[in-house]
Amino acid sequence: MILAKDYDELLQLWEASVRSTHHFLTEEDIQYYKPLIRNEYFQAVELHIIRDEQTQHIAAFMGLSEDLIEMLFVHPSQQGKGYGKKLVEFAVRKKNIRQVDVNEQNEQALHFYLNRGFEVISRDAIDGQGKPYPILHMQLKPVRLRKAEPEDLPELQCVFEESVRTSCCKNYSPEQIDAWINRASPERWKELFCSDLQFVIAEETDSFRITGFTSFNQQGYLHSMFLLPQFQRKGIATFLLDYAEDFAHRNQLPSLFAEVSLTARPFFEKHGFIVEEEQVVKIKNIEMSNFKMRKFFTLDS
C-alpha cells in the first residue's frame, strides 16, 4: 500500500529517472512538473512499486488509470534488472491495461514499449500541459512477440507437438512423427533453452496463449519454427521470421540457415530461402527426409 509519506521518495525517484532519460526537458520544465507530480498526479493514479530487497528503497514505480499506464519510472541505479518489464506485465496481465502514452523524444521508453508488444496508434503535437513535447499514444497488439521464459517450456512443447502431428501428417508417416516428437523430451527442451538459442514466442494478448514460436542463435542458425494449426496462414510465421531476420541484420549476419521439413519447405522458399542439400536424418532407426536451406543477406557496407 502506498501512503502519502511515500510521495517524497517517489518524487525523488521520478526526478532522478527524468534527468537520466528525458534530456529534452529543460531545468525550468522539471521544476514546473515537480509539484504537479507530487501534489496531483500521484493522487490521481493507482500506484504500484517495487522495492530493493536489500535497502527497501523504492526501485521503480508505475501509475495506472482505468485503462492506461500513466507513468512508469525506474531509478537509474536500478535499471537493467527487469523492474520495468515486471511492472508492465503486471499491468497487462493482472489489470488488463492495453494502452500507454510516451513522450516521442524519450526514445528509450519508446523502444521499451515496442519490445513489449505495443504499437503507436496516434500522436499529439503537445503534451497535456500544452508544452511542445509530442505524445505518442500506444496500444498493445492483438498478437505480440516476446522472449520466452523458463515457465513457457511446457506450453512450447505442446505447440510443437500439435504443430508436428497436425501439419506434418501429409508428408511424414505416423512412425516418423512419433520419433520426431519423442526425441523432444522435457530434458531436451531444458537443454535447448539453456543453450545459445534465443526462443521468441508469438502470444495472443487477450488470452496470453502462445500461438507459435521460433528460435535462433548468434551464428544465424534458425533452429525452430512451429505454430498451432489454427493460427497458420495468418501471418504469424512471417511475423516470427521477420523478427529473426531483423536480428540477423542487426548483428550483421551474412545469412540465416535451417533444417527444414518437407511441410515447411514452401514457406521458407516463399521467403527467399534456397535449398542447399536434401538429407536423410535418422531418429532411433527411423529415417526422415528434410532440407538444409539458407537465405543470404546483403550486408551494409
Image: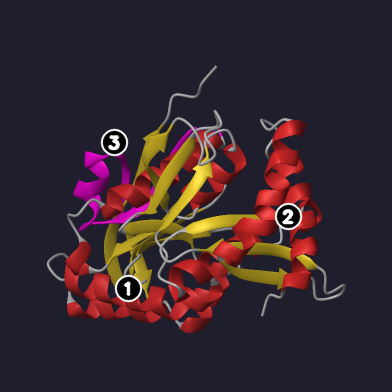
- For mark 2, what is the residue? 79
Q: Spatial distance from mark 1 to mark 3, Cα to Cα?
A: 33 Å
- For mark 1, what is the residue? 207
Q: In this view, does 151 lie above or below 274?
A: below
> Circle 1 sits in a helix, a strand or a loop, which is it?
loop
> Circle 2 sits in a helix, a strand or a loop, which is it?
loop
Mark 3–mark 2 contact, CB under 8 Å? no
Image quarter in which the N terminus is found: bottom right
Q: Is residue 165 left or right of residue 159?
A: left
Q: Nearer the N terminus, badge 1 or badge 3? A: 1
Residue at position x 30%, y 58% in the image? 142
Q: Spatial distance from mark 1 to mark 2, Cα to Cα?
A: 29 Å
Q: Nearer the N terminus, badge 3 or badge 2? A: 2
- For mark 3, what is the residue? 272
Span colored in magenta: 252-279
Residue at position x 17%, y 74% in the image? 173
Residue at position x 68%, y 44% in the image? 33
**Furthest residue in direction right, as rendered:** 55
Q: Nearer the N terminus, badge 1 or badge 2? A: 2
